[in-house]
Each structure stands twice: as structure tokens, then as C-alpha cells.
Amino acid sequence: MKNNASISGALAGLLLAFLDAKNLAAPECRERLSKWKLDGHVAMDEWVTCLFLIRQAYPSPTLGLEIGQFFQPEYAGLLGYLCLSCNTVGDIVERFERFFPLMWRGFTLQVESNAEYYSASWALSESPAEELLASPLFMEIRRLACETGAAGMLSFIHRLCGEDVIPSSATIIGNPPENMTVYEEFFGCPVQFHKTTISFTVSKQLFSKPISLDKAYLLRMFEHQAENELREVARGDSFLIHFNKAMSRGLHTGLLSVTCIAHELDMSRATLQRKLKDRGMTFQFALDQARIEKAKVYLEDPRVSLAEISLLLAFSEQSAFTRFFKREMHMTPMQYRQEVCG
């Protein structure tokens, strides 16, 4: 299954959680997983190898579905943490579309949407050779890898919502298993199997489901934001409080124009720009400040790569983020991480 695809190293936690729950030794698998960097990516081949080793120790016909049920938000790496700050399932979908590469690399994502349904499908950018696709063993292992991911995503959303989120249909890579009923019961919908594509279709009515989460995984980042808000409260400036919140959401969605932020604040462009001018700032200055403040927070965490920070701050590429940071801070992001953050 040689290709250039890779996945978040944080997924090691998912496989280790399953091994521990089933009291499986699987020494070779555990040794491999110990070498995964939680803040990095591992080759898709390595993911498949570890699943194959688990299957040798635990030969269940529904192994992928069983592993997927142990999925926790932290196993999605940085994408998982971003989703923890969402308010609804619709917000998760938006995060998923925008930050998809944080979890999966070497895949393409296609989205179709209308007033009633939302469908997302993804596949390897480089399709395997036809001789591999004709191999039953190869397709069986691919199905195991992909059904684990599909089941994990469904379990992820379930944990955030506190209730089942049932898709209208699902497609998994691989040849159909002998017992299709188990899959349809697990996903709660018709399931198809495809050589190269995995997909979900859901009703847009699900988008309004609220996220219910008590664990403060983002506590440090939230505290930083809260400190900024407290300073504005002390100044008695409610406009800046709401403006900073809108800018923070804009960084996550990529909707950072004056028009988008004005719409978020339910005011005209002219009103927004006038309010900023009254406080001695321009919109570009405010955007630069918001980016710098968040960049500092991200740089304090060595697990977040510069490429990921660039994506999180809505820069087109890492070099653009580096130029921006150096202009504002008179040092590169890496120098800041090494010299200021230690």
C-alpha cells in the first residue's frame, strides 16, 4: 500500500486505548506506536501495519468498528482540539472542511451540499495500482483501515453531541464483508463499499445539534482569550470584546474581510471602520494584532508545527506567515519559539 499519504500521529492513542481495553500484549504493535510523534504525521503504511498486527492478536470480523468506538477528541490531534471549541455539529463540519489536512495528508476532499443534505467524500490523491485493487487481502486491509477511521469519526461526533448522529448513507473503502448487517446497524444507515472512496451523507437538520462538553481541553488558550477580554472589560469597551471574538472566529473560518466581520457584528462596513477609527486603529491593524496574539499562544506549544500555525491563522502558506511574524516581531517564528518560549 505504498503511497505518500499520512495521518496524525495522535491516532496512536486510539490504538493503544483499544489494546489496553482488550488486554492485548501485541508487543510489536506497541513498540511501533511508541515511536509515533503525537505532534507529527505517520505514513499510511504504518497505520495499516499496526492495524494488521492488532488483527493478528484480535481477529474480529468487525475489528475496525470496535476500535473506532474508542475514539476521543484528542486522538484527532490539532483538528480535534479545534472541534472542541465548536458550538454545533455545523461548526464541526466547517472546521473539518477547512482544517482537513491537519489530520489527513495525501487525500482529496470533495463536498456536495444543498438545502437538505451535506455529503463529504475523500480518497487518496494517488490511487493504488489496479493489481493491488484486485487483491482480496489488500482490499480487506484497506477496509479495516478505513472502517476504523469512519467509525472513529462517528464516535467523535457522538461524544461531542452526547447523542447519536446518524448519517443518511455511508461508503467505505474495501470489498463488502460477509456480514453487511453489522455495518448497517452500527452506522444506522445503508452502507456501500467502494474501491477508492469513503463518504458520508447527513441531513442538514443535524447541523443545529449543540455540542456538549465539560472537559476544558482548550483551557490554556481560553484563559489567554479571557485575559484579553478582561482588559477590555476593565476599559468598559463592549465593542472591542465582541469585535475580538468575531476576529477569533474569523481566523478559524477564514472569513476575515471587513464585510464578513461587520456582518458577524450585525453592522455595516462603514460603522465597523468608524468604531475602529474612534479607537485609533484600522481593520488591518486589528487583524495583525489578533494574528500575532494567537501566533504567540500556538508557538508556546511545541506540538503545533509552523505549517499548522500558518493554516490556523488563515495564511496562504507558511512562508507568508513567517514574513508577517518577522515584520511584526523582528524575529522569525522559530526564533521566537526557541528564544522566548524556551
Image (tube, rainbow, N blue to C red):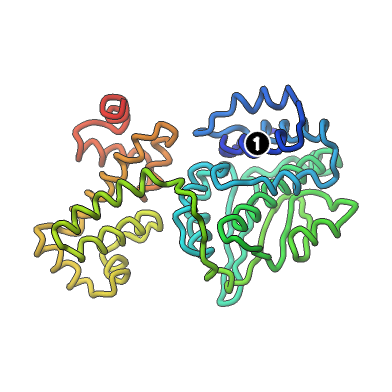
Q: Position of residue 289 (x, y in %)?
A: 22, 49
Q: Position of residue 257 (x, y in %)?
A: 29, 62
Quarter holding residue 193? bottom right
Between 261 and 84, the residue placed more toward the observer is 84
* Residue that carries the numbered disc 1 in the rendered image: 44
Quadrant in which the C terminus appears: top left
Asked whether, in this view, residue 315 is left or right of residue 281, the answer is right
Asked whether, in this view, residue 28 is left or right of residue 35, the answer is right
Asked whether, in this view, residue 41 is left or right of residue 177, the answer is left
Between 334 and 210, the residue placed more toward the observer is 210
Quarter holding residue 3? top right
Q: Can residue 1 be seen here?
A: no
Q: Residue at x 50, y 47 (%)?
A: 79
* Residue projecting furthest to the bottom: 115
Q: Position of residue 6 (x, y in %)?
A: 60, 37
* Residue projecting furthest to the front: 214
Tell me which amino acid carries mark 1: Met
Q: Residue at x 25, y 74 (%)?
A: 267
Q: Residue at x 64, y 67 (%)?
A: 202
Q: Residue at x 86, y 42 (%)?
A: 136
Quadrant in which the N terminus appears: top right
Element class at badge 1:
helix
Q: Residues within 10 Å of mark 1 (few under 14, many from 20)?
A: many
Q: Position of residue 101 (x, y in %)?
A: 52, 46
Q: Is the residue 290 above or below the residue 51 in the image?
A: below
Q: Can residue 148 be seen here?
A: yes
Asked whether, in this view, residue 282 is left or right of residue 5, the answer is left
